[in-house]
Image (cartoon, rainbow, N blue to C red):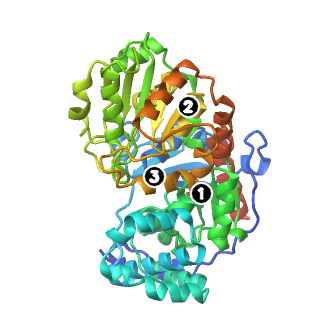
């Protein structure tokens, strides 16, 4: 496909310019809405390429508040085929369309400069999480050609040339259209604001460059508390930002200096809003009936993270075996795979321990990661898993927040459960050096355990004393989420409406 085939006057789009937005919003209160925002007729385009962001669109007050503010809403969603009731249809002022086609970067022209840029910033700022990942993962995963970029990167970092380099790379990427379909849509129907919810992902930056070529302002939502300190660079400079908490705002300003002159809105964590909605709540009896559990016995939830990062399954299997053998008394365990990465591959691991151990299986098994979504049944299962758990066991993941919101005690592994413990040092660094998780791991709100026997004893302790560490769990929720009132989606909508009003003015 070429520019002529879609009929896009690219030169006309490129000729349009934008003034830089200035100012910083410390927080947004949905109870204090402005008349100007309420009178707005802005056309808002929301992008989603992640199951976790789909939760925000569907199960928070984000979209409803945008509509109440007078905006029309369009959603480009990579998982649109899971929304049979919405795909390709219009409901009120909401239109849902499949995500446009996106092509890859050119390996030599674009990917190598991007890797060089990441190395330069890593050498300049020495983020513990990035250095840890480089030592334990990236050095072995990168090709020799990519590793050879480290030498010039050291020199450029010593010269403090990171900003100049990134500006040049941004210019190069902007000159390489990656989504002709997005450009065609913008030419046919221009939104007032694009909301990118995946600025660190592969697909959405392609839509950003198409929008900017047409002079459309783009605000970036940072979709998790760890993204700034763990993900690869956002090369593009967005016109505004939405973040969960003040710590992320500080990190954004430190590691992306241009953000200091852009509006930054602190809104809380909208993906957890659904946990406050009683319409999803089941009784313990209802939940246990769905999961094949006994409502009269304690429930231990073992939440497994991404298999692409750490091998956590041996820890869950070891605890399952001890439960089946009666080492923890009369209890039961529910194993929850990561909803984005579950492919129903663990059934053989845990079936020998039934009926004391049950495995949740996602309806998304086998789907491409960016095609996954969650219907109301899956959201109900997610929420009640943590509502009715008596103890949650995990390895340094965001489920600590899911549990803490419901005041559920959390046992956090501080060791590698797999044979040989190849990732022992990496796990210790995650818990005690990585900027996003160190405050949580060392908060006193989770029970850190150093081996399998300590894990068993910690579970027993929490079953006997569920009130232990309660105040520190509340601190964790406040620190990570900023707000825990179930209205973060509304705050995000207020931020978008304010940004649209500011840019329109």
Q: Nearer the viewer, mark 1 or mark 3?
A: 3
Residue 16 at x, y percent in the picture: 59, 78
476 is higher (above) or lower (below) than 105: above
- Per the image, the residue denoted by label 2 is 275
Crowd around label 2: few <14 · some 14–19 · many ≥20 (10 Å) = many
Residue 163 at x, y percent in the picture: 60, 82
**Image quadrant where one finds the N terminus:** bottom left
Labelled disc at residue 435:
1
State the SS at label 2.
Answer: helix
Q: What separation in Å lies between label 2 and label 3 (alpha carbons)?
A: 28 Å
Q: Nearer the viewer, mark 2 or mark 3?
A: 3
Of mark 2 and mark 1, the one earlier in the sequence is 2
Q: What separation in Å lies between label 2 and label 1 (alpha carbons)?
A: 26 Å
Q: Nearer the viewer, residue 234 or 436?
A: 436
Of mark 2 and mark 3, the one earlier in the sequence is 2
- Per the image, the residue denoted by label 3 is 427
């Amino acid at each position: 496909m070429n520019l002529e085939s879609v009929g896009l006057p690219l030169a006309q789009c490129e000729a349009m310019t934008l003034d830089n937005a200035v100012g910083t919003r410390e927080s947004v209160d949905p109870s204090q809405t402005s008349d100007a925002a309420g009178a707005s007729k802005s056309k808002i385009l929301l992008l989603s390429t992640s199951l976790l962001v789909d939760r925000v669109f569907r199960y928070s007050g984000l979209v409803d508040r945008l509509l109440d503010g007078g905006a029309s809403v369009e959603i480009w969603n990579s998982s649109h085929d899971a929304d049979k009731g919405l795909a390709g249809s219009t409901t009120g002022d909401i239109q849902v369309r499949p995500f446009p086609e996106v092509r890859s970067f050119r390996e030599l022209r674009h990917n190598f400069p991007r890797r060089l840029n990441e190395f330069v910033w890593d050498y300049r700022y020495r983020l513990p999480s990035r250095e840890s990942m480089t030592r334990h993962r990236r050095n072995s995963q990168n090709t020799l050609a990519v590793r050879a970029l480290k030498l010039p990167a050291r020199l450029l970092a010593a010269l403090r040339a990171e900003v100049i380099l990134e500006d040049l790379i941004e210019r190069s990427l902007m000159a390489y259209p990656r989504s002709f379909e997005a450009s065609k849509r913008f030419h046919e129907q221009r939104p007032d604001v694009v909301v990118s919810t995946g600025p660190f992902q592969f697909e959405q930056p392609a839509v950003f460059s198409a929008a900017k070529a047409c002079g459309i302002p783009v605000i970036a939502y940072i979709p998790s508390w760890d993204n700034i300190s763990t993900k690869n660079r956002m090369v593009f400079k967005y016109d505004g930002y939405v973040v969960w908490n003040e710590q992320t705002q500080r990190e954004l300003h430190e590691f992306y200096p241009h953000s200091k002159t852009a509006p930054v809105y602190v809104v809380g964590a909208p993906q957890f809003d659904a946990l406050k909605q009683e319409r999803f709540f089941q009784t313990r009896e209802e939940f246990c009936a769905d999961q094949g559990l006994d409502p009269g016995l304690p429930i231990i939830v073992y939440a497994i993270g991404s298999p692409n990062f750490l091998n956590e399954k041996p820890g869950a299997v070891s605890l399952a075996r001890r439960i089946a053998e009666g080492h923890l008394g009369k209890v039961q365990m529910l194993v929850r795979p990561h909803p984005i990465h579950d492919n129903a591959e663990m059934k053989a691991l845990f079936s020998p321990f039934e009926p004391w151990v049950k495995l949740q299986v996602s309806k998304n098994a086998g789907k491409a990661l960016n095609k996954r979504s969650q219907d109301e049944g899956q959201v109900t299962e997610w929420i009640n898993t943590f509502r009715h758990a008596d103890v949650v066991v995990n390895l340094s993941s965001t489920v600590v927040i899911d549990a803490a919101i419901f005041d559920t005690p959390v046992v956090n592994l501080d060791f590698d459960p797999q044979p040989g413990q190849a990732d022992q040092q990496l796990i210790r660094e995650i818990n005690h050096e990585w900027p996003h998780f160190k405050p949580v791991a060392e908060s006193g709100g989770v029970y850190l355990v150093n081996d399998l026997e300590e894990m068993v004893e910690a579970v027993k302790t929490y079953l006997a004393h569920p009130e232990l560490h309660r105040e520190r769990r509340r601190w964790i929720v406040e620190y990570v989420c900023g707000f825990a009132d179930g209205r973060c989606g509304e705050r995000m909508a207020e931020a978008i409406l304010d940004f649209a009003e500011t840019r329109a003015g």
